[in-house]
Image (spheres, helix red, strand yellow):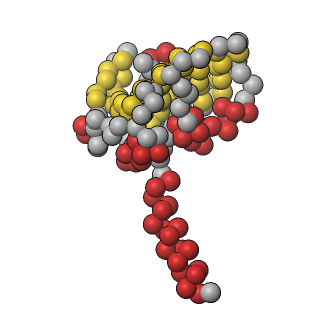
């Protein structure tokens, strides 16, 4: 019985780091795990220093791009080591639970600020998202305003 417990604890301690994905509001040090979970090509950049630098409205931040096996292009936007936004487009909707992390529940349960047959927008005090699409073409983006650099809005994410 004790050996079984030790085995379970060992497996849990080894696999725990694999669940730390670079999702909204989390650290960029685990972006490579997103590539694994989303079955995407490895990101071009492997550390924060080599991420693509972007300047928008005077704000500097980094972007990291993943491409899944199904052709979904996912961009992760980070500043000061934290992912503050994501954007995607492709033939399918990506795993939004993976991308939104702890904010996925807010996305699911919040009353949309706008909703139509092809579009859904959610806007809370610290989570803003916009998703749209039709069969074969989907796109979306989400941002955590409190983590984003000044002057960067959801419309800045491309």
Q: Residue 114, relative to residue 63: is it above or below? A: above
Residue 30 lies, in percent from the top left, at 40, 48
Question: With respect to residue 9, does 122 lie above or below?
Answer: above
- At horizontal 29% and vertical 43% (from top left) the residue drawn is 47
Who's the residue at 52% across and 78% down the image? 7
Answer with left or right where residue 42 lies relative to residue 94. left
**Residue 11 location in percent, x, y?**
50, 70
Relative image position of residue 3 (x, y in whole percent): 55, 85
Residue 87 at what x, y percent from top left?
47, 25
Quarter of the picture containing the N terminus is bottom right
Q: Is residue 118 above or below residue 65?
A: above
Q: Nearer the viewer, residue 36 or 152?
A: 36
Residue in the foreground of this view, choosing between 111 and 97:
97
- The residue lying at 45 percent from left, 30 percent from top is 70
Q: Quadrant of the C terminus?
A: top left
Q: Is residue 80 visible?
A: no
Tell which of 110 and 55 is nearer to you. Answer: 110
């Amino acid at each position: 019985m004790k050996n079984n417990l030790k085995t379970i604890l060992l497996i849990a301690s080894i696999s725990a780091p694999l669940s730390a994905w670079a999702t909204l509001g989390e650290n960029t040090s685990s972006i490579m795990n997103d590539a694994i979970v989303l079955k995407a090509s490895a990101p071009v950049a492997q550390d924060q220093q080599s991420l693509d630098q972007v300047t928008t409205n005077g704000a500097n931040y980094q972007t990291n791009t993943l491409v899944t096996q199904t052709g979904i292009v996912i961009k992760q936007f980070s500043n000061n080591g934290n992912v503050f936004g994501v954007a995607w487009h492709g033939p399918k909707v990506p795993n939004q639970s993976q991308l939104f992390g702890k904010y996925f529940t807010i996305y699911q349960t919040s009353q949309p600020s706008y909703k139509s047959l092809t579009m859904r927008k959610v806007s809370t005090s610290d989570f803003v998202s916009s998703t749209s699409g039709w069969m074969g073409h989907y796109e979306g983006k989400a941002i955590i305003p409190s983590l984003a650099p000044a002057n960067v809005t959801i419309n800045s994410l491309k």
